[in-house]
Image (cartoon, rainbow, N blue to C red):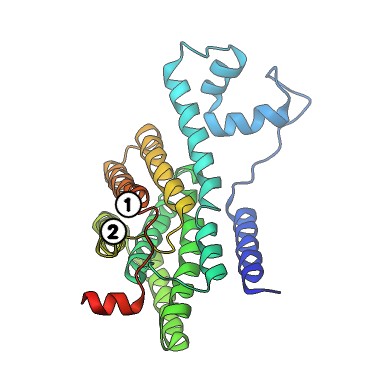
Amino acid sequence: MSKRNYVLTLFTSIILIYCCYALPITDSIDNSIQPYRWPSIISSPMVQLLSETCYVSLFEEFHLFSDLACIKLAISKALGLGIVVGGAIVKIPQIITILRHRSAQGLSLASFLLETCAYLIVLLYNTRLHHPFSTYGEVLFMTLQNIIITLLIVRYNDRQPRRTTMALVVLLAVAVIFLTVVPSWLMLLLYAAQIPIGLASKIPQIRANYLNQSTGQLSVFAVLNYFLGTTARAFTTWTELDDPIMLGGNLIASFLNGILVLQLIIYWKNKWPSSEEMMKAE
């Protein structure tokens, strides 16, 4: 089995195992008492997703244009689920690009390390507060993908990949344990701190692109989808959660991803400079 197939198989297995474990399991509805016009296979998950009030308003009484509050909630839920699905594959093209070219040229290790740290904080913060999975679920999958990309960057760019890989794995394990046991008040402070961490995670990549006038092996699909995802996530956070810190973080992430999209457009045809060219420039 090739390295690419191995990585994709491992990643898909992790997703399936987590979904079976993390997604809520509810008792089945007694089919002998069906209060809704639609079959239970449709009505039951929709009630779980939208609440009974909004389900009845939109799908039983068909107030599709008058009930603005429920319409906004339905749009937010649809976007949220779309973001979670998109998050499960958003960085797969980046992983494939690295494996195909056997190179992580143009990718900033500092950016991915900081971004992964911010993702871990967001993931555990939302899990501990029992927020709906549709409001943060993509962070789980992007964290796993970021870890894979980080290890690949070390594999292809570092002179001592084994030692660095072991150090990163130990650091990741310590971070997860720490974030799991910290008290709630400290978790809130860490979540506020992840906003500047997330900001800092994009700066090295933006700076590297600007200095080299190229985006290297940066995946167009990943950047575009990440920009759309963070923009939509800002809307779902504003709609479903009363959390200004989380909203602010999503808005900043959307802005910085927008800069990366502009760089992809501006430097579209430029190639990443070779090592000799970079040495001459210095």
Q: Earlier in the sequence, mark 1 or mark 2?
A: 2
Q: Does the rendering let one see residue 258?
A: yes
The reply to whether callout 1 and callout 2 are in contact (CB within 8 Å) is: yes
Residue in the image at 46% along x and 46% along y: 225
Residue 60 lies left or right of residue 68; in this view the side is: right
Q: Nearer the viewer, mark 1 or mark 2?
A: 1
Image location (x, y in percent) of residue 56 = 57, 18
Q: Distance between the residues labelled 1 and 2?
A: 8 Å
Circle 1: residue type = Gln
Circle 2: residue type = Ile
* Corner quadrant of residue 42: top right
Tag shown at residue 206: 2
Image location (x, y in percent) of residue 128 = 42, 54
Residue 57 lies left or right of residue 224; in this view the side is: right
- Residue indicated by mark 1: 263
Q: Count the numbered circles shown.
A: 2
Residue in the image at 30% along x and 56% along y: 191
Nearest the viewer among 114 and 171 is: 114
